[in-house]
Image: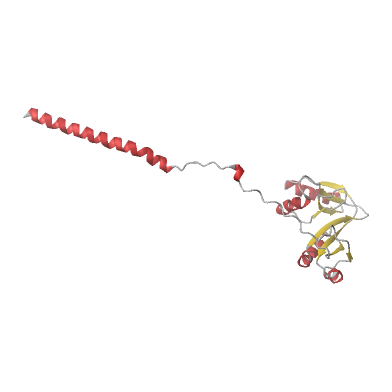
Amino acid sequence: MIVRLLLVVLVMLNLSAAAWWLFHRDHALLSPATTTNAVPALKLVDATHAPPAAAEAPAPAIPADAVCASFGPFADAAAAEQAKQQLRPQAMRVDARQVAQAGHGYDVVLAATDTTGSAMFERLKTAGIKDMFVIRDGADAGGVALGHFGSQEGAQRRLAELQGKGFQPRIRPSGQATFWLDVVAANGFDSATVRTAVHAPRGERVSCPAASG
């Protein structure tokens, strides 16, 4: 009787061991596949197939029959900017320029760099800077004029403001500054009527720059 009982116990132990071994083996075989599928494979991006950076759009050509005029002088940058906004719907292009007259004062100027004046203007605008113009001619052509001040203290305050935003302009002595707007418009543009509308003391027809068809 005892022998039979021992045989039954041994058979049960063998069956239990076999069942555990089979279950453990199946679980071990399935685990790596499950883990592998859970993590997506990495894919390398071929830099040679990356989309090219958008090229800066070229300035539109000036028609041969275009009308070009200059309006001014405006006493300050705010008056010139207001007139510029009025002129935009009627013109193909409106450029502002600052002209120094005989007298005393100080200009804050950001000199030209490897970045174009227009690109620097946009950077300044994004930083919240106002009252500025791209310098079109003269020794500082390509730079940005950031204000004319009657005292050195005022110019120093403007300088500190700009330096606080990461720009490095300079102060230069100059005469009293006035502001002009150079306009390129389609044929039929009435400069006399426009001069009155924007409150410009003078409105002059000028030759168009690089006029082409």
* Residue 56 rendering spot, x and y as whole percentages: 71, 52
* Residue 36 rendering spot, x and y as whole percentages: 41, 40
Query: What residue occupies the far right of the structure in this picture?
Result: 102
- Number of marks: 0
* Residue 166 sits above or below residue 181 on the image: above
The residue at 19%/34% (across/down) is: 15
* Residue 47 rendering spot, x and y as whole percentages: 60, 42
Location of the C terminus by quadrant is: bottom right
* Residue 153 sits above or below residue 178 on the image: above
Query: What residue occupies the far top of the structure in this picture?
Result: 3
Q: How was the colour assigned to the protein in this rendering?
A: secondary structure
Q: Nearer the viewer, residue 18 or 108?
A: 18
In this rendering, position of residue 55 left or right of residue 172: left
In this rendering, position of residue 73 left or right of residue 32: right
* Residue 83 rendering spot, x and y as whole percentages: 80, 65
To which quarter of the image does residue 187 belong?
Answer: bottom right
Query: What residue occupies the far left of the structure in this picture?
Result: 1
* Residue 82 sits above or below residue 117 on the image: below
Query: What residue occupies the far front of the structure in this picture?
Result: 213
The residue at 16%/33% (across/down) is: 12
Q: Nearer the viewer, residue 54 or 204?
A: 54
* Residue 97 sits above or below residue 171 on the image: below
Location of the N terminus by quadrant is: top left
